[in-house]
Image: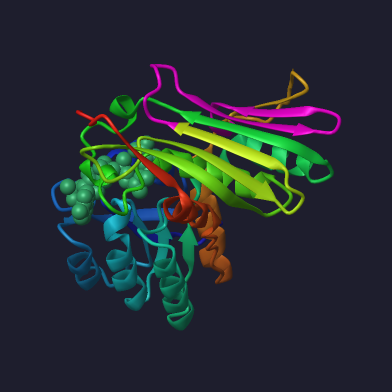
């Protein structure tokens, strides 16, 4: 029988309600005892309006799962780590790359676990794709991550503001899969960023990466897509083509479907968090966020028509 970890959620919004609350309810290894959110409340647990009040009032709390937008994650994570709580970060792990190193150091100092999650890495096709690609010579990679921003991010002002990533908010999910399944490191060579005149962040991006051998790795992220989202990664190798579709929920190799089991991204994240806490380990990989930072550094910015919600 697993030890039950007393946990709280901070930032009760779309992802907390859609995924975190159901995943926690189904996991006997966790006991959700409280939440903190400025406005929202969750029935059946104690509710606070900020993380500081939560930490002060809940001495038996062991872990906090941070689900607010990335711009406020560092301050919340810092407070929780200093209070000796294990911390799970929604993606992206923060508003800058370097702040995650500071959090990792605090976790070590306070002897608690820090888990920077990448939910898309727990899509069922990802580990199968990684194993299959491990022995392959890759000749090209084409990524398309396209969706309708009005459908997936209605009225989310934070996503357009500094630290909110714009189209890289979903695009970083593709990057989290690419950095997991591709057998070699890759880096950004050039990027085109398409930024609405009235917003800080891009609504679309074209990215060109290379690995050490010069393999062309191309990604197109676009928020101006029609009603059907397109979240796919195609990897061409010397002998075959691997295709991950539906964000990693389906895998085809040379046109044949591979049996990869059901979707369980968030249940998988909480299983991993429990394992990290139980073994006293942390899991902090900033490589997907590093690629986004590189795109913001190197990308050619094209100002386009304003985006009106
Ligand atoms: P959201 O619903 O807009 O935000 C979550 C909640 O955080 C809000 O309801 C709000 O609750 C609180 N919040 C917002 N701004 C805040 C601020 N400045 N300070 C403190 N709290 C604030 O966003 P979301 O879609 O759940 O996304 C949250 C995180 O999850 C993002 O990093 C996103 O990338 C990630 N994520 C989202 C999805 C998705 O499908 N939406 C999927 C995977 C991951 P209160 O007003 O009650 O404080």
Q: Would residue 231 be counted in the magenta stretch? A: yes
In this orientation, does residue 283 appear?
Answer: yes
Q: Looking at the picture, tell me which residue is in the foreground, 228 or 126.
A: 228
Q: Would residue 236 be counted in the magenta stretch? A: yes
Give percent across and percent down for residue 178: 61, 44
Q: Quadrant of residue 121?
A: top right
Count of numbered tags? 0
Considering the image in quadrants, where does the C terminus appear?
top left
Q: Is residue 168 above or below residue 212?
A: above
Q: Looking at the picture, tell me which residue is in the foreground, 259 or 170.
A: 170
Residue at 20% from the left image edge and 69% from the top image edge: 52
Give percent across and percent down for residue 194: 37, 36
Locate residue 255 relative to residue 291 in the image: left or right: right
Q: Is residue 61 above or below residue 118?
A: below
Magenta span covers which residues? 222-248
Residue at 40% from the left image edge and 52% from the top image edge: 90
In this orientation, does residue 43 appear?
Answer: no
Residue at 48% from the left image edge and 45% from the top image edge: 172
Q: Is residue 239 above or below residue 284?
A: above
Q: Looking at the picture, tell me which residue is in the foreground, 32 or 77.
A: 77
Considering the image in quadrants, where does the N terminus appear?
bottom right
Give percent across and percent down for residue 184: 72, 52
């Amino acid at each position: 029988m697993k030890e039950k970890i007393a946990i709280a959620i901070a930032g009760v919004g779309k992802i907390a309600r859609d995924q975190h609350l159901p995943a926690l309810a189904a996991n006997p290894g966790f006991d959700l005892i409280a939440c903190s959110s400025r406005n929202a409340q969750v029935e059946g647990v104690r509710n606070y309006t900020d993380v500081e009040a939560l930490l002060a009032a809940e001495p038996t709390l062991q872990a906090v799962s941070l689900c607010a937008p990335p711009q406020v994650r560092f301050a919340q994570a810092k407070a929780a780590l200093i209070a000796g709580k294990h911390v799970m970060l929604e993606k992206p792990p923060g508003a800058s790359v370097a702040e995650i190193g500071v959090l990792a150091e605090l976790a070590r100092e306070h002897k608690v676990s820090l888990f920077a999650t990448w939910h898309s890495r727990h899509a069922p096709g990802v580990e199968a794709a990684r194993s299959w690609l491990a022995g392959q010579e890759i000749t090209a990679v084409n990524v398309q991550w396209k969706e309708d921003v009005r459908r997936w991010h209605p009225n989310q002002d934070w996503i357009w503001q500094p630290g909110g990533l714009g189209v890289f908010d979903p695009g970083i999910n593709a990057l989290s899969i690419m950095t997991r399944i591709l057998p070699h490191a890759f880096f950004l060579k050039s990027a085109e960023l398409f930024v609405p005149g009235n917003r800080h962040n891009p609504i679309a991006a074209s990215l060109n990466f290379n690995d050490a051998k010069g393999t062309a790795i191309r990604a197109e992220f676009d928020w101006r897509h029609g009603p059907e989202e397109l979240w796919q990664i195609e990897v061409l190798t010397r002998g075959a083509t691997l295709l991950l579709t539906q964000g990693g929920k389906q895998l085809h190799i040379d046109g044949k479907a591979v049996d990869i089991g059901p979707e369980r991204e968030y249940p998988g994240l909480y299983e991993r968090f429990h394992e990290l806490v139980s073994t006293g380990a942390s899991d902090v990989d900033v490589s997907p966020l590093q690629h986004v930072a590189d795109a913001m550094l190197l990308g050619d910015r094209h100002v386009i028509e304003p985006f009106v919600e």
